[in-house]
Amino acid sequence: MIEEKVFVLFALMAATLCVTQGSPVILGKGTKVFASGANMSMVCEYNSSSMLTQSDIQKLKFYDKNGDEYDGTRNFMQSHSMISSNKIATTLTKESLGRPDAGTYQCRYDNQEAGKFLVTVAVVKFTTTPDEYNMTAGDKQTNTLKCNYVVEKEDSVTWDKEELMWSREDQPLSARHKANNSVLVIENTEWTDIGPYTCSAKLTWGGVGNPSSETVSTMVPLNGAPKIGKMDTSKNVVQEDDLEIKCDVTGYPYPSVTWKKDGQPLTPNKRITLSSADGKYTNAILNINNLEFEDKGEYTCNATNSVYPGGKTATIVIRVKDKLAALWPFLGIVAEVIVLCVIIFIYEKKRSREMEDEADGGDEVVNSDDHKGKDVRQRNIRT
């Protein structure tokens, strides 16, 4: 897949300019860079030795090298303002700059040739070739990124030096990254290598006496299909607690996550919210506040991106317990102890009564025997 991006390089042709009162001046440093698709904005100011009126502010305008005004027919817009009684300004804007915007810009007051301020525009067009991480090959693969560019400019603009450089998130590349001008080779590619790489063209002009340079860049991606890290298959939570479920997703382009509950799309509300993870992965974090019993079920996250619409999924089962659930076992133990105590109490009381009855019955038997013994003795005495 080849992506083309255009950057606009605004190079002020005059290194120094003697500006007298009554001459227009385009503000800004000597070089300006705009990305394709971005909004361009240039400001021209005009100082007058005499007082200006509201009708005068319309006289300060931008023109091309042929003297034609930049207007809406070419998707340009000029807005005018009065800064002070003797100072006015005009702002030239355009959306989505491209190669046709290369050329000469000039600012004039009352369309006067004298005192005009000139700017030239060079357009840098990048042609890039991304690559894709193969999940099957793993760390044994080699990936190659390519970046080339051409410059559209006025013939009067020449470069003293042109350099093409590679970087990744403004960090130096590792020893496995081999950069050779327009080609970047990644050896033994690791999963952490996926993501955007920056291809930068540095243009230098002005010679030894007055050197100037500008760097314009584009992005070349090493794409990777969405991948979801380890995720619990189930989780027990308590009623009225808060719950956070993170879909631990990676990949490039950065995947976006959608959620389902029991197979149906999950709709956020006051209690259920979605947020991004690491500022990259949209809706990767699901938060449910003040859990209810109806929140139990299967939650599935699906991660997709523009290159891999099929994506990856992961599911977790959420079980919501009564907030008093931990109390029930304790109450059960207490009830068992109470019942056991009652049983013991009844048993002991019954046993005590039986012992008393046995004691009373034993005394009667002993007395009866004593009487019988006395009778026997008495009978023996008589004989």
Image (tube, grey):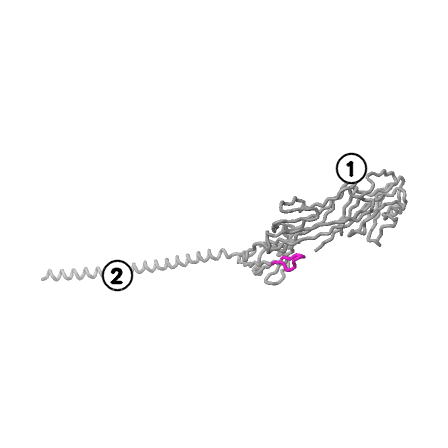
- x and y percent of residue 7 in the render? 76, 49
Whether tag 1 and tag 2 are in contact, CB under 8 A, the answer is: no
Q: Is residue 86 visible?
A: no
Crowding at mark 1 (Cα within 10 Å: few <14, some 14-19, many 20+): few
Q: Is residue 159 left or right of residue 112?
A: left
Would residue 307 be counted in the magenta stretch?
yes
- x and y percent of residue 247 in the render? 60, 55
- x and y percent of residue 144 in the render? 66, 51
Residue drawn at 79 percent across, 47 percent down? 122
Residue type of the residue flagged with mark 2: Gly
Q: Nearer the viewer, residue 124 or 344?
A: 124
- Report the Cα–Cα distance between label 1 and label 2: 133 Å
Q: Is residue 97 left or right of residue 131?
A: right
Identify the mark at residue 361; answer none if there is no mark.
Answer: 2
Residue drawn at 44 percent across, 56 percent down? 333
Would residue 281 be counted in the magenta stretch?
no
Crowding at mark 2 (Cα within 10 Å: few <14, some 14-19, many 20+): few
Q: In the rendered image, which quarter is residue 332 located in?
A: bottom left
Q: Secondary structure at mark 1?
A: loop
Quadrant, the C terminus: bottom left
Which stretch did the figure color magenta? 303-312
Q: Which residue is mark 1?
A: 208
Residue drawn at 39 percent across, 58 percent down? 340
